[in-house]
Amino acid sequence: MANKPEKFIDENGLRLDGRAVDEIRPMTIEIGVLSRADGSCYLEWGKNKILAAVYGPRELHPRRMQKPDEAIVRYRYNMAAFSVEDRARPGPSRRSIEISKVSRDAFAPIIMTKYYPSAVIDIFAEVLQADAGTRTAAINAASIALADAGIPMKGLISACAVGKVDGQLVLDLSKDEDNYGNADLPIAMTQDGEISLLQMDGNLTKEEFKKALEMASEGCRQILEIQKEALKRKFASHEEVVESLAEVADEIIEDVQKEIELIDEDFEVSELEDEDVIEITIAKTDTSEPVDKAQEEDFTEFTEDESSNVDGPEGYEADKAGERHEQ
Amino acid sequence: MGREIVVPGQLLSDNANESGSGTYVKEGRVFSLLYGVANIKNKISVIPFSGKYIPSRKDFVIGIVFETTSSNWIFDIGSPYDGLLHVSEYPRRVESSKMREVFDIGDCAILRIKDVDASMKIELTLREKGLRKIKGGRLLEVPSTKVPRVIGQNGSMVSMLKKETDCEIFVGQNGRIWINGKDENMDKLSEAIDMIIRESHISGLTDKISKFLQAEGETEDINAYEEVKDTDIEQEEIVENANSADEEYSEDAEKVNESSSKANQLPDTEES
């Protein structure tokens, strides 16, 4: 459609769309737009329109993909067929698979996957309208959707791109700048400035690259503020919200206190039982496996014993342990 | 000022000792892990706005059987992890061939979590007071983070609901609520619970709901209302002698309902 503009930056130092070289496009964020998703976010950034949804943590199938000690994260970046002027062929492409992969990795430093062993967290980012920088926009949206889903994270991820047009570095490329510029450098980072995604297309000198990193950090910092602001605003319309949630929190705190006491008591009592507990676990795993079909008879026997016995767990454990040794 | 909305990664304190649930410590400073409300008492904790139910030991939950094996019933407990009820955790002895007669697929029960191990294998039990199979009534589902709101301070909301609607109520930590009573009362109650969830951010909610229920009683359903979430679980009477045993165990249900609601409101208390 549009041909290459003659100049990207005018005499006043302004870009085609009237922005300064270090200015990002206006961003609006809406949270919780999808009622069936656990967390969702609709983000507009310039002419980019992104819908992000998060599901999970939920059970992962097939089982062989599960990681026993942590949750896995799946990220799907997809461009709608109508998101660009020429119809984008639906389905995964080389490009979208790559973007999905790097975006997933961009979230690795912040998501507390250890809290949800063998589960999965699914992130879907759909580009409804594309206008350069969709991967960074998708990451910004996904970050909010994750927070909305109540997933524990060390912080938010913010992303933006720096590019070079007319030999000059500019922040947050627009469509034409991206198409006809000399370089594109999308970066995602944590709030501490730790870089979790960095790709580059085109050429930059060492000095330009350093300068570009600085500009990107500043851009990400601004975006982080917008993200935080959006999250805080979601409930700000209800004045009482904080107050009332805190009421609930108070109740919970009291309970936590109680629970802690309970647990403490338990600890005092159960210290010696520790080894037994471990044994039970092993024995139980055995029985729940198909192997136990062959052993059904032994098994029934033991239940009989148990019910005729005292209800105390000792007899139970002993039997279980016995069974294990037989194997 | 003790409480505010926080986002993940927000600095909460410079004192690492103040780290409570929903927070983490980095370089001696406390940050938030979650999007929610920070609560500052002697420790700082963050109560999330949303999130899945993650089972923890001693929680009371309502489960739905989705599979039976020769020695276990497998329950969906509304979390990413399934719950296992071993035959030995059923109050009576059950032949492995008769597993389906005790709990068939789709049956519901009030259960307690006996143990959760590191790989999130969840062992359930029915061998405690108040735990039993659910017969009749309705099952509602609410977000598990809203459970404390439904229970209210020291169970104030639940006892008010019970009094106003004359229904039996059991609130599981996993966000499933079982109610039983007359049909019209259950309609009213599920509407009230829906309202609690919708308006969970309003303070003085217990009074508001109480007024709502009283008004409702007088005007007799002016606005027709469709409860979408409820699943009718009218069940056939359980076969054989299961009845006698079940009744024994249901006697104390009421009491336990109340004590459990208090003792189990906390979300998972993982700390980093």
Image (spheres, coloured by chain):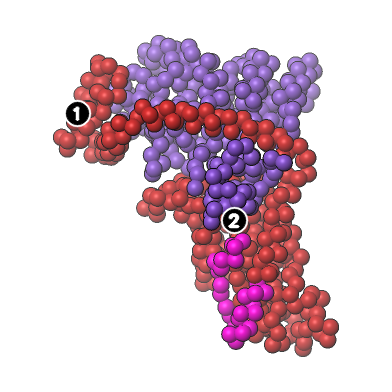
Q: Position of residue A279 (x, y in %)?
A: 26, 36
Residue B151, quarter of the rendered image: top right
A323 shown above or below B4? above
Q: Secondary structure at mark 2?
A: loop
Task: Say which of B264 and A54 sits in front.
Answer: B264
Q: Is residue A208 magenta?
A: yes
Q: CA distance from mark 2 to mark 1?
A: 53 Å
Q: Amino acid at mark 2?
A: Gly
Asked if marks 2 and 1 fall on the same chain, the answer is yes
A171 shown above or below A165? above
Chain A colour in the picture? red
Q: Chain of mark 1?
A: A
Q: Seen from this angle, which residue lies furthest left?
A: A326
B255 shown above or below A241? above
| Residue that numbered label 2 is attached to | A155
| Residue that numbered label 1 is attached to | A298
The label on residue B169 is none
Residue B123, quarter of the rendered image: top left
Q: Amino acid at mark 1?
A: Asp
Q: Is residue B117 magenta?
A: no
A173 shown above or below A40? below
Q: Seen from this angle, which residue lies furthest right?
A: A12
User: Which chain wears purple?
Assistant: B
A215 displayed left or right of B78 = right
Task: Say which of B244 and A303 sits in front.
Answer: A303
Q: Residues within 10 Å of mark 1 (few under 14, many from 20)?
A: few
In the image, the segment drawn in magenta is A190-216
Q: Answer with mark 2 or mark 1, whichever residue precedes in sequence.
A: 2
A247 displayed left or right of A92 = right
Residue A110, quarter of the rendered image: bottom right
Q: Position of residue A48 (x, y in %)?
A: 70, 66
Task: Say which of B11 and A11 sits in front.
Answer: B11
